Image (cartoon, coloured by chain):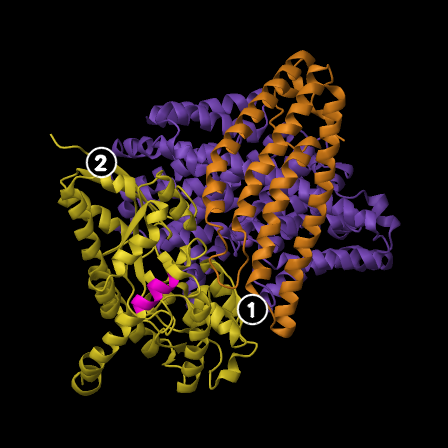
């Protein structure tokens, strides 16, 4: 008779949130796959944000071992260890394929575990939104000058980059984005991508949808696991968890491609949304500012180690994707 | 014991005055942030974070003073009709229970604050405030003040003073 | 294990009835039965929950509204507010109470937090109502019910949470809630008109002689002097949301600044008034948040004891059918509302039933509105009702909890009536979102 394990998994996202908590590759889907593959030997109860703990308390709860797993994005933990930023997304970073290359085969996951070792935790990728969108703007952005005094909801590292270019950065919880944008308390807002943004109704508040998230070119969901609990799992259950997480990593991204294709078509065709990329020199300015912000961060040796690994991989991958993906998109796709 | 209780109550009063100023600063800060953003499109992440940092300080430092001033809410459906000795017994029990509960909160939160202090946790936003652990540390501090206040209250109750009503300042 | 959950509800009830303060009753019953049921483990999550509350962005609105209310009270400008309303209502019995419902609707449109509206209304209107000969329980009932309207009239925390749990757009729910929210207010007003006619002694009009003593001209002068400033403040809060000056949570800061200005112009402002207002603000806020924190012990224990299993087991005993399922959910929400606060109810009951009801083809927006109307009662039902505690916290000493309990009973009935109306006529909820395309 083999041992049975009853685990708890918290999430940074509300119960029912598509992609994160509900649907293919989500946290509940992950738990279901693990339960089925292990024939119920590893039974994971999933809690949405606020059910057991508030949204961003998963790190401490897993660290303390009160819950065994948390499902979120590692960049929520940059106040605890800045290197965590790189395992979710870094501005002007890699896309889904490149990110997976780095994580699975370029030493990314090993570094991730090295960063979390002092906290007694291990982590692995288990979801990805694919490329996100720059966000919703009430007015057209023609040049960097248009950022001056622009009021924008944008959290995190990208917020810092925008702030350096004169944007007035506003911190707002998800529920207040729509009323604030609609009424003009803010002039622009970043959220996720077409499917999630349409759920908030942002297209009713702003018409310019700047596409391709320079700030999050693919966004990894993190499965965070208490190391002591992990070590207690027999090898086969560990393998089941790793494989289920890898499956969800791919399946959730696939779901996003479908959901976003549908949503984007609807937004542009039926809802009068103007979708376009930012002008070239705006992107250039954002890149310069990002480099400055990151240069500041790499003064920490651990951050530098992760940063160098990430960007060394990216340099190589960029050359390869230039002659593979890029050529495909420009010359072959049609 | 009585002078000591008086001293504690005086100290809690002073902390209470402090939280009144915290409340004023917080309200002013929210208003200033709103107006600066609206009129001049000026704002910063740290100033917005400071809003809820002040809220946390206001709540946790203000609890003990509020309770001392008789702010606790109770269902007086039957209590109001209890004879005085029974009322006092309920009050003593309530004080002892609140002390026990607060001590449990302190014990639970020390590890939580320690986790944060050990890594010098700061805001997850690059434009935000440092010393996140200091805000978390207000949880045990706030309940510590509550324990002291309730001990002083207990001394008064056992010395024969009447129920919570009389300890209102 | 779920037996412990039942025992915990019982234990909480007993402590509360003994007169142990609400905060202590919640924490003690939660700790004792949680500890018996699952030991210490889950309780180590409490600090994270406390931190989530004291640092919770949405709670910032509480001190802001409290400050506005207390400042207005201290300015004594509000003293006359209801008198003027009463004069304007003429011989209509319950005129001031109707004014409170209308004020609740306006306040509700500025905030999604019940405490804010009840505290403001309680501070401003309860003493005047009692002085004017209103029955204490009638006065308390109308304030609690009107204040609770803020949780159905958008913006509202309930709607934001439900949109998360039920995967619906916040905008759609905001639009859908306008109909049921206004209907509820109308039902309250209709009730007050009828009761003013049936039992005039409980809500007297201003005596004829006194009304005659004030000339029309004098009344209008007073009208501008006392009615305009507070209404302007509400307009300042609402206006700053509508005008894009402030996000809903921070909008009350404009009201707070406005209250200082109004008091300044009235010549009653000085440092002592400011200090006293700040002290009251921190006291009221801290006590409410203390209760909210101790409620976390209770909520965590209820979850740890698998309180939801009780509900699932009962549901299995039921005959099938859409309406049975809907009304069972409504009954569960109503009963849980006696003991548990709306956030936990939403987390516990809604996910249990949502898959069943959606598979039966129930319109989720309509269902969300039934839930929202029903949750209104959780604020009013004793022993654990936020509206009751908020009002008790600011009521004059001669008002005891019995007056409040007695006062809310008819309004709970009116909420049930509104629930039935929204059930029978789904268009009350569904018309507006469709009409404006949200
Ligand atoms: Na509202
Ligand atoms: Na209730």
Q: Which residue, as the protein is rendered here, is positioned at the far left? A: A1
Residue behind mark 1: A185
Where is residue B107? Give x, y as percent.
50, 31
| Tag in front: 1 or 2 | 2
Q: Please determine whether, in this image, residue B125 is positioned above or below residue C93.
A: below
Q: Distance between the residues labelled 1 and 2?
A: 49 Å
- Using the rendered image of the protein, determine whether residue B4 is visible from the camera's viewpoint: yes
Chain C, which colour? purple
The chain in yellow: A
Q: Please determine whether, in this image, residue C130 is positioned above or below residue C11.
A: below
A320 or C41: which is nearer to us? A320
C209 or C348: which is nearer to us? C348
Q: Is the magenta stretch mostly helix, strand or loop?
A: helix
Residue in the picture at 60% in, 55% down: B51
- First in sequence, mark 1 or 2: give its number: 2
Residue behind mark 2: A5
Q: Does the residue labelled 2 lie within 8 Å of ligand 2?
A: no
The chain in orange: B
- Using the rendered image of the protein, determine whether residue C188 is visible from the camera's viewpoint: no
Q: Judging from the image, what secondary structure is the residue with disc 1 in?
A: loop
Where is residue C14? Give x, y as percent.
51, 21
Hey, which quadrant is residue B85 in on the image?
A: top right
Residues rendered magenta in the picture: A303-310
Where is residue B114? Give x, y as percent.
48, 41
Where is residue A53? Give x, y as percent.
41, 43
Q: Judging from the image, what secondary structure is the residue with disc 2 in?
A: strand
A284 or A111: which is nearer to us? A111
Q: In which quarter of the image is the C terminus of chain C?
A: bottom left
> Does A60 appear in magenta?
no
Chain assignment, label 2: A
Residue in the picture at 71% in, 29% down: B8
Mark 2 burial class by Cα count in 10 Å: few <14, some 14-19, many 20+: some
């Amino acid at each position: 008779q083999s041992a049975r394990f009853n685990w708890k998994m918290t999430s940074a996202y509300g119960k029912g949130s598509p992609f994160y908590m509900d649907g293919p590759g989500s946290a509940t889907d992950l738990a279901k796959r693990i339960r089925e593959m292990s024939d119920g030997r590893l039974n994971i109860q999933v809690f949405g944000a606020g059910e057991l703990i508030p949204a961003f308390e998963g790190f401490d709860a897993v660290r303390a071992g009160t819950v065994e797993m948390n499902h979120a994005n590692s960049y929520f933990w940059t106040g605890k260890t800045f290197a965590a930023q790189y395992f979710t997304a870094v501005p002007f970073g890699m896309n889904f394929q490149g990110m997976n290359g780095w994580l699975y085969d370029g030493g990314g996951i090993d570094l991730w575990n090295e960063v979390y070792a002092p906290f007694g935790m291990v982590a692995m990728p288990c979801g990805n939104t694919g490329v996100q969108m720059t966000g919703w703007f009430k007015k057209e952005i023609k040049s960097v000058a248009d950022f001056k005094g622009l009021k924008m909801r944008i959290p995190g590292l990208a917020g810092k980059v925008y702030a350096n270019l004169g944007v007035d950065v506003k911190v707002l919880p998800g529920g207040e984005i729509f009323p604030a944008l609609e009424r003009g308390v803010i002039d622009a807002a970043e959220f996720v991508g077409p499917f999630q943004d349409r759920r908030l109704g942002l297209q009713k508040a702003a018409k310019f949808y700047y596409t391709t998230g320079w700030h999050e070119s693919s966004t990894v969901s993190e499965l965070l696991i208490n190391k002591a609990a992990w070590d207690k799992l027999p090898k086969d259950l560990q393998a089941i968890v790793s494989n289920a997480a890898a499956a969800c990593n791919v399946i959730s991204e696939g779901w996003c491609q479908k959901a976003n294709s549908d949503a984007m078509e609807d937004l542009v065709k039926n809802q009068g949304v103007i979708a376009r990329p930012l002008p070239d020199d705006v992107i250039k300015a954002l890149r310069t500012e990002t480099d400055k912000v990151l240069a500041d961060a790499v003064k920490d040796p651990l951050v530098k180690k992760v940063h160098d690994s990430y960007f060394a991989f990216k340099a190589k991958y960029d050359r390869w994707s230039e002659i593979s993906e890029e050529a495909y998109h420009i010359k072959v796709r049609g | 014991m009585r002078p000591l209780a008086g001293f504690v109550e005086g100290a809690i009063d002073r902390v209470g005055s402090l939280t009144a100023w915290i409340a004023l600063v917080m309200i002013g800060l929210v208003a200033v942030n709103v107006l600066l953003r609206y009129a001049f499109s000026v704002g910063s992440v740290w100033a917005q974070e400071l809003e809820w940092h002040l809220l946390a300080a206001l709540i946790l430092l203000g609890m003990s003073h509020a309770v001392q001033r008789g702010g606790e809410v109770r269902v007086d459906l039957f209590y109001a009709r209890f004879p005085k000795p029974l009322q006092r017994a309920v009050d003593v029990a309530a004080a002892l229970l609140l002390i026990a509960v607060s001590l449990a909160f302190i014990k639970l939160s020390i590890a939580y604050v320690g986790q944060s202090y050990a890594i010098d946790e700061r805001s997850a936003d690059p434009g935000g405030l440092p010393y996140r652990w200091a805000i978390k540390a207000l949880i045990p501090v706030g309940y510590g003040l509550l324990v002291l206040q309730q001990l002083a209250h207990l001394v008064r109750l056992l010395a024969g003073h009447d129920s919570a009503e009389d300890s209102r300042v | 294990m779920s037996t412990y959950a039942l025992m915990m509800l019982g234990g909480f009830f007993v402590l509360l009835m003994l007169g142990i303060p609400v905060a202590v009753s919640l924490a003690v019953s939660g700790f004792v039965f949680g500890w018996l049921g699952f030991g210490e483990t889950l309780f180590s999550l409490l600090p994270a929950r406390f931190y989530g509350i004291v640092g919770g962005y949405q709670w910032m609105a509480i001190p802001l509204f409290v400050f506005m209310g207390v400042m207005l009270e201290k300015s004594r400008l509000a003293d006359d507010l209801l008198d003027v309303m009463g004069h304007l209502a003429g011989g209509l019995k319950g005129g001031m109470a109707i004014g409170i419902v209308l004020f609740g609707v306006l306040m509700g449109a500025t905030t999604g937090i019940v405490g804010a509206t009840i505290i403001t209304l309680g501070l401003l209107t309860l003493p005047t109502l009692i002085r004017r000969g209103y029955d204490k329980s009638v006065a308390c009932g109308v304030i609690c019910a009107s204040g609770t309207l803020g949780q159905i009239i958008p913006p509202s925390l309930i709607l934001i949470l439900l949109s998360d749990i039920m995967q619906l757009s916040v905008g759609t729910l905001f639009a859908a809630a306008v109909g049921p929210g206004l209907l509820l207010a109308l039902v309250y007003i209709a009730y007050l008109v009828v009761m003013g006619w049936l039992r005039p002694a409980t809500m007297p009009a201003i005596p004829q002689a006194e009304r005659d003593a004030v000339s029309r001209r004098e009344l209008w002068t007073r009208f501008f002097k006392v009615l305009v400033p507070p209404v302007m403040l509400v307009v300042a809060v609402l206006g700053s949301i509508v005008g894009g000056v402030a996000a809903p949570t921070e909008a009350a800061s404009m009201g707070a600044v406005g209250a200082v200005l109004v008091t300044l112009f009235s010549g009653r402002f000085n440092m002592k008034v400011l200090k006293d207002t700040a002290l009251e603000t921190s006291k009221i806020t801290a006590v409410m948040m203390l209760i909210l924190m101790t409620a976390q012990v209770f909520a965590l224990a209820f979850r740890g004891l698998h309180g939801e299993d009780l509900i699932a087991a009962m549901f299995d005993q039921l005959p099938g059918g859409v309406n049975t399922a809907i009304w069972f959910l409504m009954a569960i929400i109503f009963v849980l509302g006696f003991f548990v606060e709306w956030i936990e109810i939403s987390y516990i009951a809604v996910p249990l039933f949502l898959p069943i009801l959606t598979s039966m083809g129930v319109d989720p927006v309509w269902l969300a509105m039934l839930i929202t109307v029903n949750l209104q009662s959780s604020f009013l039902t004793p022993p654990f009702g936020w509206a009751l505690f908020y009002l008790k916290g600011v009521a004059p000493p001669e008002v005891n909890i019995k007056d409040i309990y007695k006062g809310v009973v008819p309004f709970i009935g009116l909420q049930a009536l509104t629930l039935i109306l929204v059930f029978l006529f789904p268009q009350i909820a569904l018309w507006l979102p469709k009409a404006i395309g949200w």
